[in-house]
Image (cartoon, coloured by chain):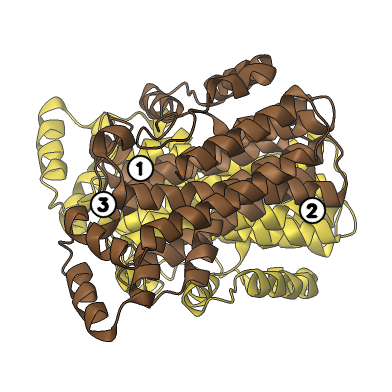
Chain colours: A brown, B yellow
Amino acid sequence: MPLSNPNSSAPAVDLKSVYEPIKDELAAVEEILRTELSSETPWVDQLLEHSWLLGGKRMRPAFVLLSAGCLGTIKKPALQMAAALEMVHTATLVHDDILDEADTRRHEPTANSKWGNKVSVLLGDYLFTHSFHVASFSESTAAVRMLAASSNRVCEGEMRQNAWRGNFDLSEADYTQMISDKTAELTACASGVGALLSDGSVEQVESFRKYGLNIGIAFQIVDDLLDVAGEADTVGKTLGTDLLNQKPTLPVIHCLANLTADQRESFLELLRSGEAKPDAVIPILESTGSTEYSRKTAADYATRAIEFTDSLDSSPYSSSLRTIAQFVLARTR
Amino acid sequence: MPLSNPNSSAPAVDLKSVYEPIKDELAAVEEILRTELSSETPWVDQLLEHSWLLGGKRMRPAFVLLSAGCLGTIKKPALQMAAALEMVHTATLVHDDILDEADTRRHEPTANSKWGNKVSVLLGDYLFTHSFHVASFSESTAAVRMLAASSNRVCEGEMRQNAWRGNFDLSEADYTQMISDKTAELTACASGVGALLSDGSVEQVESFRKYGLNIGIAFQIVDDLLDVAGEADTVGKTLGTDLLNQKPTLPVIHCLANLTADQRESFLELLRSGEAKPDAVIPILESTGSTEYSRKTAADYATRAIEFTDSLDSSPYSSSLRTIAQFVLARTR
């Protein structure tokens, strides 16, 4: 993920600085992950190391810790939940790569391409169940419950996405619900559980959850948009895979709803051929203003997240949450 | 599963009666499962109904409730954990059927054969994560921790089994560890968590765990034995699938360790051909007394479980735990 969109006139937002106030805590989370993702069985250990290395920017742990920091001292249960959330995230990546038949992720071979689908199924299961083991050390059943409910919604969202492949009649509301569940639910959980573990009130937990939800939705819309309208070098992965996999995304859904009946039929034919390339699709999306509409929709969600951070007491933690939201907003431009 | 081995001279053990003292509690567990395994999305609901119907004899819930009953009143958290354990068990069945490429289970089409591997991956994930949601309502992080640790060992056992397919150098100790993890760990957890939720001491929890572990190991050895030496009508499934899948089981491991070097080589050749049929294998196993050895080993584990129940206060609950152990012992004959 680029730190800013080089096509954009928006100022670059430095994401590195957001980790500064939680540097020590993140190191402790990393230590938990390193310890938990190891096994005495060399064969299993090798798989777990793969999943540890799969970790990206540890954004979900950062949301837990920053949200906890906004409301009080960051205590040990927050570290446990931060590690648990990262493990759930990794589990979903491992199983996603099976569903997408993906060969590489972040320029590395995926578990399924290295060891096959069967091993990947078990590796994901191991990570899911282990995450709840780590979470149980938070000694908070409310936190475990939040993690379980969210993980479950992620699975339901994935099921829906899988069932809706090739369904271009999807409404914008259905799409939003799907990405809320499959992507934004975990960032929402991360922020919410951080607030919960610093003894936040029900209202506070809910508003931190909402922050994470808005961030996640904005992020996923931009991700879907970049898949068709981004530049391969900048995005860092093969473009057009959603089109080839016939995943309905916001620009496509908006476009279909705004074409004439004839235009719609011929666009649908292209989409269903399974051979739609970004170069052919972009002019159609532009004709209905659908890329711009998608950018604006994502920007609205990011803006709501920024507004929430304005309501927080000033601190290095709330400042980091604001910077993350600004970063997501900058990506929409 | 037959109530007794008709080839056996042992008296039939009536398994139905063991549910009698926990009839109402099991009905409540069934209600939790029915409610939790439903969704507003019809597509998802259909999958969850499949997994609900997949349920067999609800043995794991029975272990939770009976063990809890042995040490006190069966309270609501025990019902939650009983339902959660059944969901974890179902999740492992759904993913097992992917690994085994199985088309039918209990005479019904498997999820993977009906909806494909991708849907089955997600259904299993849904069940795993949902089980922890249900478990979190027990309001006991110790119980959640026990469930998570056990689920995790099950996954590690499955990983080992998958890695060891075709590895006929496996020692008996490795085999026992593998089946302890992949099968017996969940029955151990069920008994242990039942004791925990009736405020059992650390020693009591451990001894109930051990009971479930012994039952599970005995059960799996018999299961492995019946796959090669059972009768299809009685066992109720296709025989010889472990041989075809080149899974090393106790009779085969024991036999290989007791053949001459030449005999061993030729048996290995047969096993590795992937075409070994029970009819051809049984005489070889009999020549080293390996089916009898396996029966005796299983009987030893079942006997230890029976001995544990002798140490319990007399009650309908402890009586049921004894009957289950006697049933497993009868299966070894």
- The reply, left or right, for residue A272 in relation to residue B220 is left
Q: Secondary structure at mark 3?
A: helix
Question: Mark 3 and mark 1 in contact (Cβ < 8 Å)?
Answer: no
The CA distance from mark 1 to mark 3 is: 21 Å
Which residue is at 76% across, 49% downward? A207
Question: Label 2: which residue?
Answer: B138
Same chain? Circles 1 and 2: no
Q: Quadrant of residue B263?
A: top left
Query: Disc 1 marks which residue?
Result: A120
- Residue B115's disc is none
Cα separation, mark 1 vs mark 2, equals: 31 Å
Q: Is residue B120 above or below residue A112?
A: below
- Asked if the residue at tag 2 contacts the one at tag 1, i.e. Cβ–Cβ closer than 8 Å, the answer is no
| Crowd around label 3: few <14 · some 14–19 · many ≥20 (10 Å) | some
> Which residue is located at x 18 percent, y 54 percent?
A279
Count numbered badges in the picture. 3
Residue A120 seen in the current view: yes
Of B276 and A84, the residue lying toward us: A84
Question: Which element is circle 2 on?
Answer: loop
Q: Is residue B119 above or below residue B274?
A: below
Q: Residue furthest front?
A: A9
* Image x and y of residue A68, in percent: 77, 32
User: On the image, numbered disc 3 is attached to which residue?
Assistant: A241
Q: Nearer the viewer, mark 2 or mark 3?
A: 3
| Residue type at numbered disc 1 | Ser
